Amino acid sequence: MKDLRGKTAFITGGASGLGLAMAEAFGHEGMNVMLADIEADVAREKVEALRAKQIRADWVKVDVTSRDSVRAGALATVAAFGKVHLVANNAGVGAGGVFGEVPEGDWDWVIDVNLKGVVYGMEVFAPLMQSHGEGGHFVNTASMAGHISPAGMEPYCATKFAVVAMSEGWREQLAPRGIGVSVLCPGVVSTNIYAGRRNRPADAYGPDGRPVDPAALEQQREWMAGGIDPLIVGQRVVEAVRDDDLYIFSHVEYESVVRERYERVMAGFEKSKASPALNTLPGDRRLDVPLGRR
């Protein structure tokens, strides 16, 4: 997708943060943009702001935890713009805590939004992209938490590691169909993800069980405010889509941390090479074929 002008992007979580930044970045490249968000009033307001910048935009209410809702959003986008060429599966929420104290509902919520929401976006839109024959691209938002796992962030990291893994596999499967797949892995960006619990439905996931601590919330807000400008990340995404990059990083300072993690992985291999138990196995073993291709 070298030429973006006149093509259409569908962006989940599009009414704020990284989603809105990607919408603006793609819009400035001449794309039509559909903001898909669970907060309809906010999406409507942001569409007006994009239109004031001469960006052709529309909005649709979408709950990414529902395949039917994602499908309805796809139909609305086709009705508005004719075709869909790029999908940013960007909607995400944060959850974590002390081991044994994370509510069951939080696990379900973060998996439904961060993991299943990406699955639904991929499976609903890939056939639509393939049908028009003009190629397409997916950008799946993971995180640096898809490569490293700080203690206390296990639910969030589990879903983001999954998004990285799924994107790697889907990229191989969809390339022959003319569809690219990238995975966006940012660090701290100045967004409002810290306030995402406002959209956690109690009827689906049970009572929150976590009273709001205004001081803690303010601390998180200040921390997130110190992140980089999301529009810069949106512009980096445009570059990556044009270049058909698999991994999109915006925080290069994390390179050493990721390298340290893989050094520990490789140390595990080295330790196992000296294992008395493993050294009883035949020496002519071959790599498993599917894994060996990578």
Image (cartoon, rainbow, N blue to C red):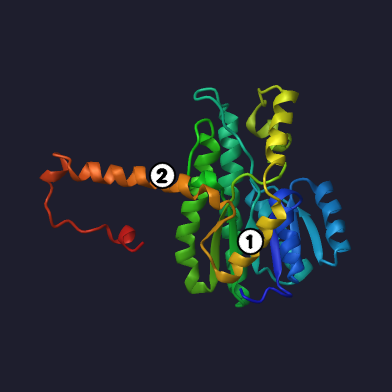
Q: CA distance from mark 1 to mark 2?
A: 25 Å
Give the camera-side residue of 185 and 7: 185
Residue at the image point whose x is 75% and y is 72% from the top: 30
25 on left or right of 120: right
126 on left or right of 283: right
Res 72 visible: no
Residue 139, image x, y percentages:
60, 59
> Mark 2 belongs to which amino acid?
Glu
Q: Where is the N terminus found, in terms of image quarters?
A: bottom right
Answer with the quarter of the image where residue 271 lies. Answer: top left
Give the answer, above or below, for where 57 lies relative to 195. Answer: below
Q: Earlier in the sequence, mark 1 or mark 2?
A: 1
Give the answer, above or below, for where 166 lies relative to 175. Answer: above
Answer with the quarter of the image where residue 11 lies. Answer: bottom right
> Mark 1 belongs to which amino acid?
Arg
Q: Secondary structure at mark 2?
A: helix
Residue 236: mark in rendering: 1
Mark whose residue sits in front, 1 or 2: 2
Residue 99, image x, y percentages:
49, 25
Residue 260: mark in rendering: 2
Q: Residues within 10 Å of mark 2 (few under 14, many from 20)?
A: few
Residue at the image point whose x is 22% and y is 42% from the top: 272
Residue 20, image x, y percentages:
74, 54
290 on left or right of 62: left
